[in-house]
Structures are given as structure tokens and as C-alpha cells.
Image (tube, helix red, strand yellow):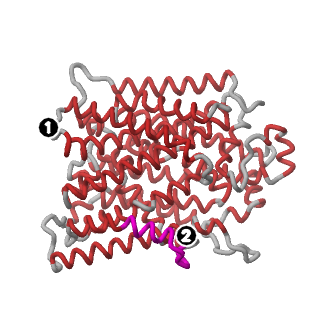
Amino acid sequence: MTSGFETWDYAVFIAYAILILGVGLWVSRDKGEHQKNAEDYFLASKSLPWWAIGTSLIAANISAEQFIGMSGSGFAVGIAIASYEWMAALTLIIVGKYFLPIFIEKGLYTIPEFVEKRFSTNLKTILAVFWIALYIFVNLASVLYLGGLAIETIMGIDMMYAIIGLALFAAAYSLYGGLSAVAWTDVIQVVFLVLGGLITTYLALNTVSNGEGILVGFSKVVEAAPEKFHMVLDEFNSDGSVNSNYLDLPGIWVLIGGLWVANIYYWGFNQYIIQRTLAAKSLRESQKGILLAAFLKIIIPLIVVIPGIAAYVMVNDPEIMSNLGDLAQMNMPSETQADKAYPWLLQFLPTGLKGVAFAALAAAVVSSLASMLNSTATIFTMDIYKQYINKNANDKTTVNVGRITAAVALLIGVIMAPLLGGIDQAFQFIQEYTGIVSPGILAVFILGLFWKKTTNKAAIFGALSSIPIALGLKFLPIPGLEPWMHQMGITALLTMLIIVLVSYLEHNGQDDAKGIKLTKQLFQTSPLFNVGAFAILIILTVLYSLFW
């Protein structure tokens, strides 16, 4: 067995690539004499069914940062990192019940557009610039870097060439086809994601059990590394030393503190996630898609976290390492290079299955890249270009500007990606630096949605002040606030307080003229949604009780 691809691996991967490109270009074609308009390109003609929405949400979310970054965190931290996934399932229910009805009723293209309807064009522009910068310099760059790292580790291809290849693959269908191409290919991508992830999990656990099966393997992993199976981390280790992982996952505060800021921002007000739900046939169809995504989030730790923990057990067991031979010494993960865990495991897959697992990893990277590119193009085109550059742009011009914007964003991401070399636990890196921007955005949206006294001036002041607050909490030596989740939660609370105070000072407690009075009708959901939400709550309660 070698670390490189063999004939069947290449065959499987090439078949995957042809399938994705073929489907992407097929759904991208113009129907008859109809040329794409803005709704076709940016919102898939508002025709997506629930199952396409649910799978596309997962494909957009699960990227290299999950497969590689979260597996790396599983190696370094353990099952506690699964809180991101399981709390996301709860967050999706909140989004489906309380946020989606408002967004769809308003007929939005972009999340900044809601800000304009609720507050002002100036605030919309500020947040649009925030998002574009975040997508390009953090999200696109990090996904390209991690995907390049995986290809370099598995196949020995130079990282820069790998990054360029991934970028061209994503661009091949997403730039031309828009959201429709992205969403429909995502349905296929998720099949590869789940299949490839399960294969890797099976391999890791079966290897630990010396061929006795995954149940025995899981039992041995728990026995060998019980400290990796605690959802709530202690601040100090058993020997009295400081638990370094506590800074990333600060105990019970993960469940009741700052992680809610990250989750609600990401699933409720993040353009490249919420854009799929805005493209639904109807509100009910969108809510059913949200429910499907929530169920899928529950199983994600099985295919991204467990392999990382199994890799930790393998590299610390001399007998297992001896049985694996010389190949095990290549690109071996460690406490300081935890993100090598998932690519390292793929080396041991047999011919053919290695191609499937690698296709899954490529699917994770490409689907997220395509989603980010489309959303960056949507925000720039609809919220900046049509607002300030060409207010009378026709559909052809709008679509072309979207394609050019996506291409430029991708080029910048390719240039930035190699500069991220050397970071460890990239999943945590992305969450930490997104957390500088997300608290202010979340504060503006939450108060804008649920407190009708919130004023435009207060929202602008809050959004702008949130950045120096976040940076101050990050770099000032404040005892007890070392975990970045604490900083993120406090930034959100302080920003909300500023918005409330400025609103009262400006209007002496009167309702803002654009204040939204939410009604019970907007919160109505189908019995299926309520039953599904209850089932998810029960499942999550059982999971947390098992690993508490």
C-alpha cells in the first residue's frame, strides 16, 4: 500500500469530477431563449425543494475546516469540539422558526438588504463591506489553504498547485451557473461527504480494533483516551496544570455563553448559508430544509471528530504504529500539528476507497468555495454595485458583474491562502477571527428584529464600536477573559448595551419609524417542523448526557 493514488483511485476521483462538472454545467444552461436574470443567478429562480436546501446547507457548511480542522481538534481536544455541530442543530431550529419567516416575507436577495429595510443604506453598506472582507480574507483563504494542505499531505502535490486546482474546479461551474449550479451539485457532494467520512471512520476504528470491527474499535478508543470523551472541559488538568484546550472550549460556558453568538450569527445572518433558504419555493419548503440540515448536523461528529480521536490513539500506541509499517511515519499528526490527522488516515485506505474518501474531501472544499464565491458576488453586486455604481443595471450586466466579482474574490483567496501556513487547529482559528466581526452583526440583527425602538444611528454606532471592543478584549490582559468565547459573548452584550443606550438617548424611548413589530403569524410552523424539532431536542439531550 502506498500513500499515492493508484489507477482505481484516479478513476473514482475523475468520475466524481466529471459528474460534478457535468451536473453543474447542465443546470447552468439557459433554457431556450431565456437568459439568466438576477433571480436565476443569485436565488436559483426561487425553485429549490426542501431536500436540496437541507443538503446544500450541509455542503456549504462542511468544508476543509470541518474535515481537516475539526478532525485536528478531535485529535487535540476530543469530542468536546462536537458542541459546534450539536448546538448548530438547535440553532437551525431557532432560525427556521423565528428568522426565516421574516426574511422570506421580505423577499430578500441578501442579508444586508434586510438591514437597509430595517435601518438604512449606510448601515447596509458597512455590513456588506464587513462580510465581503470576511469571506475573502478568512473563509475563502482558509478553505483553500486547508484543501491544499490535504492534497499536499496525501498526494505530495505542491500546495500552491493544489490550491490553484481547487480554485479552478470550483470556478468551472459556480461562476457560470450561480446558486442553481451550486445548490444542485451540493446534493451530490453531500453523498460523497457522508460516504467518504463514514469510510474513514470505519477504517480508523477497525484499525484500532486490529480488524475486530468498529464497535470494538470505538470501545478501545474510549478506553485508551477517556479524557477525549468529555463534552465539558475542566480549566485544570488532574495534575493541577492549566488545560490549554480550555482557552478554546471554556467548560460549561461553551453551552451557555459565547458559542451561541457564533452559531446564531453563522446560521441566521450569514449570507452564504442563509442564501439557500431564500431560494426556496415557499416558507414551509425552506423550514423543512432547515430541519433536514439539523438532523444531518447530529451525525457530522461521527465522520469528522471520531476519526481525529482514533488517530490520536493510533499514534500513541506503539503496537498499532508497528503494524502500520513505515507508511505510518509519513506526515504523522502531533499535538502541535493536529490538522494532519485526517489526511494521515487517508493514507491507509485501500485502493478505490482512497479515491472515494479523497473525493469527499474535495467535495467539502469545492462546495464551500462555490457557496462563498456566489454569496460574495451576490452581496457585492446587489448591495454595492447596484447601489453606488450602476443603479439601472439590467439583468445581463448584473449577472456578469456577479461572475467577475466571484473571479476576483477567488484570485485574492488564492493569493492569501499560502500565507496561512503554520497555523494549527485551523477550525479554531477561523472561529476565533470570525468572532471579532460576528458579535456586532449579531447585536444589530437581534435588536433590529426583536426591539422596535432600535434606531439607525444606534445600530451604526454599535456595529462600528464592536470591532474595537472585540480587539480590546482580545489583546488587553484582562484576568478571566482569556478564552476567546468569553470575549465574543461579552462583545455582543456590550454592543447591545451601546445600541440600547444610544437608541434611548436619540428618541427618548419612542419606537423607531422603521421598527418591526413581529406578529404571531410570522412564527407559525407546520406540525412536521415542531415534531422534528422535538425529536432533535431528545436526541441531543441523550448525546450530551452520554458524554457529560
**Quarter of the figure that contains the C terminus:** bottom right
Can residue 421 be seen in this snapshot? yes
What whole-number distance in Å separates the C-alpha atoms at marks 1 and 2?
48 Å
Say above or below: 476 vs 432: below
Locate residue 471 relative to residue 547 in the image: left or right.
Answer: left
Which quadrant would residue 519 be assigned to in this image? bottom left
Say above or below: 67 vs 152: below
| Percent of width and height locating residue 127 | 31, 55
| Residue nearest the observer in this picture, 78 or 399 | 399
Q: Which residue is mark 2?
A: 483
* Callout 1 amino acid: Asn
- What is the span of residues highlighted in magenta in the rendered image? 466-483
Tell me, for residue 503, which label it has, or none: none
Q: Which residue is mark 1?
A: 392
Q: Residue at x 52, y 46 (%)?
A: 142
Can residue 288 be seen in this snapshot? no
Q: Residue at x 60, y 42 (%)?
A: 197
Queried whether the magenta region covers residue 475, the answer comes back as: yes
Can you name the residue that lies furthest to the top here?
Answer: 32
Q: Secondary structure at mark 1?
A: loop
Q: Residue at x 38, y 33 (%)?
A: 407
Say above or below: 438 vs 194: below
| Percent of width and height locating residue 268 | 36, 57
| Percent of width and height locating residue 106 | 20, 52
| Percent of width and height locating residue 200 | 66, 42
* Callout 2 amino acid: Pro
